[in-house]
Image: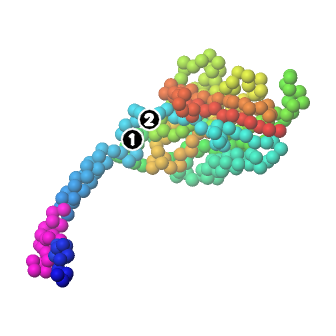
């Protein structure tokens, strides 16, 4: 028998039924009702979601976290940053330590005296001695004014940080050998409204470093065998630690001109061609240490300086 040209399984009729004016089995009014239903349905869902988020945002402050009970103690970091906790260079190759000196120069730009002359943004923070906290009021929504930054001039660091300075040893057992002096800058990571109280119950060796209104820092060789390979360690700044008058920090919105207090540490007479490990710690009552985080309240760095 001849083939029936209308025997297409009915799919053409399903897509468009010209007799009933149906598209995919529904009339235009039926499709319009379905469309309106889903617009209203998903509109309500979106409204509930947006309303929930807005209600949550009303409970949050723009300037201070609602909950800070799980904030970790501040970390201790250094400049120049080390790759895998190692600073390595050769005294005879200036290009090997250029990245370190460039990093320190760039970091210290914001501490230049000529960038802190605006009286509307900066003011003096007392004298050149550590003082107590300078409270500027809680960072609440009803007190949103910006805080003036404390001046922290580059000259307070007391030493121009540089790498690659060499001297001849005069200590017994090292006569005639070459040693190196290395400078690094220390700073504590910023925590909003953090006030590091002094810790008066420290070990006996740290008692000479305890000064009023100062969070002390102590650096030493991490390995016993390196004790005679590291010379004197000098600290530069407002004492051998972080002065309290530069705390608390109120965040980027309220404290955009804030400058972190710095401590410059000069490691003198580091033995060349040796792998030396040095650990620095900051001591405060609410500053803890963790074996899982090598920068929590401390840091250790490996120096590998070739001649």
**Residue 197 visible from this viewpoint:** no
Circle 2 is placed at which residue position? 71
Label 1 vs label 2: CA separation?
A: 10 Å
Circle 1 is placed at which residue position? 65
Can you say whether 59 is above or below 178 in the image?
A: below
Quarter where residue 137 is shown: top left
Q: Are marks 1 and 2 in contact (CB under 8 Å)?
A: yes
Q: Indicate the quadrant containing the C terminus: top left, top right, bottom left or bottom right.
A: top right
Disc number lying in front (1 or 2): 2
Q: Secondary structure at mark 1?
A: loop
Quarter where residue 159 is shown: top right
Looking at the rendering, the stretch of residues picked out in magenta corresponds to: 16-38
Can you say whether 226 is above or below 256 in the image?
A: above
> At x 40% / y 40%, what residue is drawn?
138
Residue 214: percent from left, percent from top: 58, 29
**Residue most extreme to the right:** 176
Identify the colour scheme used: rainbow
> Is residue 25 found inside the magenta-colored segment of the image?
yes
Q: Is residue 91 left or right of residue 71?
A: right
């Amino acid at each position: 028998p001849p083939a029936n040209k209308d025997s297409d399984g009915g799919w053409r009729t399903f897509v468009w039924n010209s007799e009933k004016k149906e598209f995919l089995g529904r009339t235009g009014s039926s499709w319009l009702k379905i469309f309106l239903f889903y617009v209203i349905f998903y509109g309500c869902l979106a409204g509930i979601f947006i309303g929930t988020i807005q209600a949550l945002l009303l409970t949050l402050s723009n300037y201070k976290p609602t909950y800070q009970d799980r904030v970790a103690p501040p970390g201790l970091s250094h400049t120049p940053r080390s790759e895998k906790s190692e600073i390595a260079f050769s005294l005879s190759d200036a290009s090997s330590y250029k990245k370190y000196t460039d990093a320190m120069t760039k970091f210290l730009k914001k501490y230049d005296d000529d960038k802190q002359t605006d009286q509307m943004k900066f003011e003096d923070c007392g004298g050149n001695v550590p003082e107590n906290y300078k409270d500027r009021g809680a960072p609440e929504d009803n007190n949103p004014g910006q805080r003036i930054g404390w001046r922290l001039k580059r000259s307070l660091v007391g030493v121009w940080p540089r790498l690659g300075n060499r001297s001849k040893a005069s200590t017994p057992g090292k006569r005639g050998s070459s040693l190196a002096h290395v400078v690094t800058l220390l700073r504590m990571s910023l925590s909003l409204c953090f006030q590091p109280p002094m810790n008066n119950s420290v070990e006996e060796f740290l008692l000479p470093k305890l000064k009023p209104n100062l969070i002390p820092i102590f650096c030493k060789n991490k390995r016993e065998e390196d004790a005679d390979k590291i010379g004197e360690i000098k600290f530069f700044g407002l004492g051998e630690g972080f002065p309290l008058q530069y705390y608390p920090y109120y965040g980027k919105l309220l404290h955009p001109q804030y400058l972190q207090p710095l401590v410059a540490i000069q490691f003198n007479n580091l033995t060349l061609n040796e792998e030396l490990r040095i650990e620095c710690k900051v001591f405060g009552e609410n500053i803890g240490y963790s074996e899982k985080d090598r920068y929590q309240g401390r840091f250790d760095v490996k120096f590998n300086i070739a001649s």
